[in-house]
Amino acid sequence: MDKKITPRRLGIIFVIGGGAVSIYHIGHILTKKLGKGGLNYRIAGALTGGLCISIGANLIANSLHDKLLSEA
């Protein structure tokens, strides 16, 4: 198995990692009492996770697009 980091693999890592970060921070927002400034930190974490998901989805889409164009 090739261990090379391709854009598709990197995209999958970003989607999974961003999803985990978002779920973690949203879970804290919904279930825990937040101290002073804690809400800002959790919202920023959830938005960062969402940004990582978006970057990963774009990497996956670009790699699939390139693959389809190379086969045509």
Image (cartoon, rainbow, N blue to C red):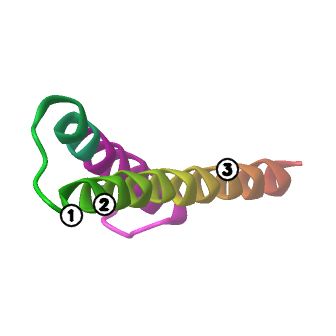
Q: How many numbered discs?
A: 3
For this orientation, the residue located farthest to the top is 31
Quadrant location of residue 3? bottom left
In the rendered image, which residue does mark 2 sit on? 40
Residue 19's x, y, as percent?
35, 43
- Using the rendered image of the protein, determine whether residue 54 is visible from the camera's viewpoint: yes
- Using the rendered image of the protein, determine whether residue 13 is visible from the camera's viewpoint: no
Label 1: how many residues lie within 10 Å, few (<14), some (14-19) or many (20+)?
few
Quadrant location of residue 38? bottom left
What's the residue type where badge 3 is placed? Ala
Label 3: how many residues lie within 10 Å, few (<14), some (14-19) or many (20+)?
some
Q: Main secondary structure of the magenta part?
A: helix
**Tag 2, which secondary structure?**
helix
Which image quadrant: the N terminus? bottom left
Give the Cα separation between the discs numbered 2 and 3: 32 Å
Which label is found at residue 24? none
Q: Which residues are magenta?
A: 2-23
Which label is found at residue 61? 3
Q: Examine the structure image and report whether residue 22 is included in the region drawn in magenta.
A: yes
Q: Examine the structure image and report whether residue 37 is included in the region drawn in magenta.
A: no
Give the Cα separation between the discs numbered 3 and 1: 37 Å
Q: Would you say the residues marked 3 and 1 are in contact, meaning their CB atoms lie under 8 Å apart?
A: no
Is 27 above or below relative to 40? above
Label 2: how many residues lie within 10 Å, few (<14), some (14-19) or many (20+)?
few
Comes first in the chain, label 2 or label 3: 2
Residues 36 and 17: in front is 36
Residue 10's x, y, as percent?
43, 62
Q: Would you say the residues marked 1 and 2 are in contact, meaning their CB atoms lie under 8 Å apart?
A: yes
In the rendered image, which residue does mark 1 sit on? 37
Left or right of residue 1: residue 6? right
Is 71 above or below relative to 41? above
What's the residue type where badge 1 is placed? Gly
